[in-house]
Amino acid sequence: MIHDLGTWSKVLELMPTAMFVRDAAHRWVFVNRIGCESFGVSAADVLGKRDDELFAPDQAARFAAGDDAVLRSHEVVESEETVTDVQGRVRTLLTRKTCIDLDGSPHVLASVTDITELRETEAQVRWLACHDALTGLANRTALFGKLDAAIGRAAGGGVTAVLFYLDLDGFKRVNDAYGHHAGDELLVEFGARLRGLLRPTDTVARIGGDEFAVLVEDAAELDVPALAERMLILASMPFDVTSNKAFIGTSVGIVPIDAHAVASGELARKADSALYEAKRGRNRYVVYTDELDSALAHRRGVELALREALRTGEGLACHYQPLVRAADGKVVGVEALARWTHPRLGSVPPVQFIAVAEETGLIGTLGEWILREACTRLAPFEGVFVAVNVSAVQLRDDRFADMVFDALAACGMPARRLELEITETAIVNADAATVRLLKRLRRAGVRISLDDFGTGYSSLTLLKDLDVDKVKIDRSFVQMAPTADDSAAIVRAVSNLGAALGLRVVAEGVETEQQRVFLREAGCDELQGYLFSEAVTEDRIESVLGGFAAAVGV
């Protein structure tokens, strides 16, 4: 029991955060110096006054209700809310309240932390992650999220949708003739024209330099040729850029989305195939058909060859790329990267055979082989962790955690030396069973890393709930960070937010000294990329573990 506020006020004055005390009638009886400075008031402004004398009625009522709840329950209550202070500033505050006795009377003691800047930065990161910074349209990641949802509805017998891919014809001539600023103006204007052509529920995205995409949902009655013709007309109309008139065209590839659609990546590939055919004639549209895509037969051949490789182990290998501590260049871990060489197909790119594995149900077998191989090879190298990529498909297997533990036990490697890299999209779409699986792995000591951060929709609340250990900033932001303001803003924001949440931040795709210097100063903890080393074969692992301090001038 506190008998004398005067004695305790000396202690509260020394606290490094804003502190205040209110009585049961909601009158202010104490506020410390930090509190006065934080909210731009003096103690004389507030002491002896009730909340309803200092704040708007609805705000005062919320404060009073919160105080009353604490006084009734005598429990510690933490809350976050947006308030308007006595100077009219809108603030986001994290308040922790508890009940205390002063001379036998109940009072509320509260500490207040201003997290306005943190929440604003989080909102900025979320917006940049799913929007194109130039046009304000959706970006590729946002589009693919919408595609996944549309595929799910179509598979359940829902209404079909249609995907349009557009590539501007003659755009390079505009850049060459009038400069890149004119080109940017044209892209913004064309995006606005597309947006005006469609319904608010449709998605318009910029997915590349002069490439756009449109996803029209609820499209069962859509006149696809008529809409495509209107897109061609929009592109052919003159553009006013830097006081000049510019003329371009567009080519359009079209893919209907029905119950046969299986993956957003496959739809994008089909749209690209149709667009490629359209560009052969320019200023026209082409609807995808199987006959257009000779790669379909190739993918079937890849599937059969991969099945055989997984059965025999022939041609499959893991290469290892080091992860370097930004502060001193010391190698702290390696990422295991799958490689496959086939006698007839040659060296098959991972993006190709992993996609095939996911679509055909082979990813579980492939993922287990990679995990066991990587753990076995790295087990002898104490003090170095191994990072292994995990597919969203693998996380839906309730036997996955047991497989991980078996692999660790088989090679005698402690769980703390294994890091599982999971894509942002996989975490956002995780169901309750997947969340439990990830928590079980982490309780056992396995570290969880969020890969490709910045390209999806993850929120900090979600990261905290999943106890993620690390975020890995996507290479697309890393490579542009030293020269592009929007990419630099994302890198700095993620580093700051990672530090605030106790997460380590990794930058991948580091290729230049300029990038390394920027990333280190921005607060990244670990770096990965060709500046240090390419992925090496298993017999060269030891050669890349010595560190890169001298090579990068640390």
Image: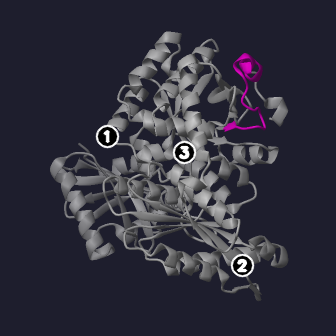
Q: Amino acid at mark 3?
A: Gly
In the figure, residue 370 lies in which quadrant? Answer: top right
Q: Which residues are magenta?
A: 527-545
Q: Are marks 3 and 2 in contact (CB under 8 Å)?
A: no
Q: Are marks 2 and 1 in contact (CB under 8 Å)?
A: no
Q: Residue furthest front?
A: 291
| Vertical arrangement, residue 257 with respect to residue 344, above or below | below
Return the x and y of residue 393 as percentages of the image width and height: 44, 37
Looking at marks 2 and 1 on the same chain, the residue that comes earlier in the sequence is marked by: 2
**Label 2 packing within 10 angstroms: few (<14), some (14-19), many (20+):** many
In the figure, residue 23 lies in which quadrant? Answer: bottom left
Q: Amino acid at mark 1?
A: Ala
Looking at marks 1 and 3 on the same chain, the residue that comes earlier in the sequence is marked by: 1
Q: Looking at the rendered structure, which numbered label has been put on residue 498? A: 3
Q: Are marks 1 and 3 in contact (CB under 8 Å)?
A: no
Q: Which residue is mark 1?
A: 432
**Label 3 packing within 10 angstroms: few (<14), some (14-19), many (20+):** many
Relative depth, front residue between 542 and 148: 148
